[in-house]
Amino acid sequence: MLKKIQIVTFTGPSGAGKTTIVGELLKNHSECKMILSLTSRGPRNSDLSGEYRCKVTNEEFLRREREGEFMWLVSFHGNIYGTLLTDINAALNSNRVSLMQITPDSVKSLRAYAPGKILSIFILLPDEEELRRRLEKRGELPKEIDRRIADCREWEKEARESRIPYKFIRNDGTVTEAIDKVGRIGLKLLFGRL
């Protein structure tokens, strides 16, 4: 089954380490690439190469939506995000493995569109004590930390109860350890030696 996989999705709550893990995979495996998504927001330092085309106008989103060009279109924290069907189809027909960081709803849509060609990974946060330590180190206030931890618990609960056959990885150590966990779920078949 894994030899048919064309797209690997990474999902998880904010702060789980998805971008770091995907960035390392891209850096170490030239056979991987990102699937481009469009967004209305400006670029961020954390964006990965090839992940977003930023500052897309509302008019362009509306025009492309009317023309049925999107696989999905979502609004999140006041910004619009969308992935074009042409980019999904190009990834499905490529000789390379494509990576995406997407929401659970988008994972469902993608898996329904391309059954058997998607591997979905859910990145879990570390235990509460470690998460609290990391958030305190970032300078977040106790009330924000409590809210973030509650949100993360909800994300994990929803993921485990969903019908999405996620491969779960707990990001509770170093980046190297997280990449090793990704490799253990079978990505060696996709990327060669991790």
Image: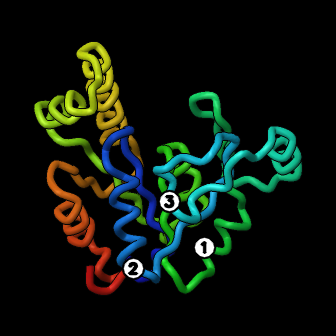
Question: Mark 3 belongs to which amino acid?
Answer: Leu
Q: Considering depth in this image, is 83 or 186 the residue closer to the camera?
A: 83
Mark sitting earlier along the chain (3/2): 2
Q: Is residue 156 above or below residue 38?
A: above
User: Hey, which quadrant is residue 16 in on the image?
Assistant: top left
Q: Which residue is mark 1?
A: 91
Instruction: Determine whether label 1 and label 2 are within 8 Å by CB.
Output: no
Q: Considering depth in this image, is 135 or 113 the residue closer to the camera?
A: 135
Residue 47's label in the rendered image is: none
Q: Which residue is mark 2?
A: 29
Q: Residue furthest left?
A: 129
| Real-space Cα separation, disc 1 to disc 2, in angstroms | 16 Å
Question: Mark 1 belongs to which amino acid?
Answer: Ala
Q: Residue at x 52, y 59 (%)?
A: 111
Q: Residue at x 60, y 74 (%)?
A: 92
| Real-space Cα separation, disc 3 to disc 2, in angstroms | 14 Å
The location of residue 139, given as percent across then percent down, is 27, 26
User: Hey, which quadrant is residue 27 in on the image?
Assistant: bottom left
Residue 48's label in the rendered image is: 3
Mark sitting earlier along the chain (3/1): 3
Q: Is residue 160 above or below residue 137?
A: below
